[in-house]
Image (spheres, rainbow, N blue to C red):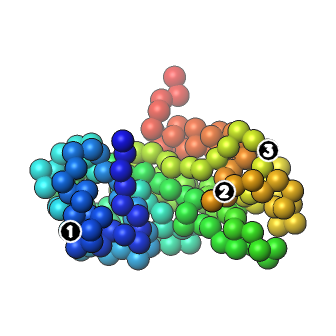
Amino acid sequence: HFLWIGDRTRKPDSAHVEFLSGVDNPIGIKVGPSIVREELLMLIEKLNPKNEWGRLTLIVRMGADKIRKKLPPLIQSINKKGKKVLWVCDPMHGNTYKSETGFKTRHFDTIVQEIESFFSIHNHLGTIPGGIHLEFTGEHVTECLGGTDNIIDNDLENQYDTACDPRLNVNQSLELAYRITKLLIKNKGISNG
């Protein structure tokens, strides 16, 4: 029910955007580091011409090394234009790489770093960090490095079960949930008492 436009298929004149502009469902737009303000504003206008709350979710996937530079100007431009969007962080896709042993992976620390930056930026700009998109499993897989299990490159082959993208395992997921809770409290997303 939640349709989204990918980072590589989000061109304002693409068939994907044209199709989704005629659909009434809520729509997500993956927002990677290559997007520029003008392109994002054109997409928002085309996909949400009535500027309705709940219509558009911007799924930020910048990467831990780029989010602090790339995201603030986008948020500021959208706020200046009065556009109604929900901001969500996808710390998985912008931090994927091929390990020395040849496995597609992500490191727990860079996932956390991107989430922390996402919250910090929104807190600084007075906007709402509306959600987080994660890929995880309740299994004890070895697909992402780091975390409490201290998975290293040579461990990846032990239980690399994904059919597509590397997922956080059960322990990494629980550790991340704990850290996100602390961020919510720190950023006044939930109350202490």
For the residue marked with disc 2, what is the amino acid?
Ala
Q: What element carries label 2?
A: loop
Label 1 Cα crowd, 10 Å radius (few <14 / some 14-19 / many 20+): some
Which percent across, then down, holds residue 69? Answer: 44, 73
Give the x, y percent position of residue 117.
Answer: 52, 59
Residue at (48% x, 67% y) in the render: 62
Query: Can I make out residue 89 in this image?
Result: yes
How far is disc 1 from disc 2 in space, using C-alphas?
35 Å
Q: Where is residue 21 in the image (x, y as percent from the top left)?
A: 20, 57
Q: What element carries label 1?
A: helix
Q: Residue furthest top?
A: 193
Label at residue 163: 2
**First reached walking from the N terminus: tag 3 or tag 2:** 3
Q: Mark 1 vs mark 2: give the one in front.
A: 2
Residue at image x 26%, y 64%?
17
Ranked by sequence position, the earlier of labels 3 and 1 is: 1
Task: Give the image quarter of residue 39.
Answer: bottom left
Q: Which mark is residue 140?
A: 3
> Looking at this view, is 52 or 1 the one in front?
1
Element class at badge 3: loop
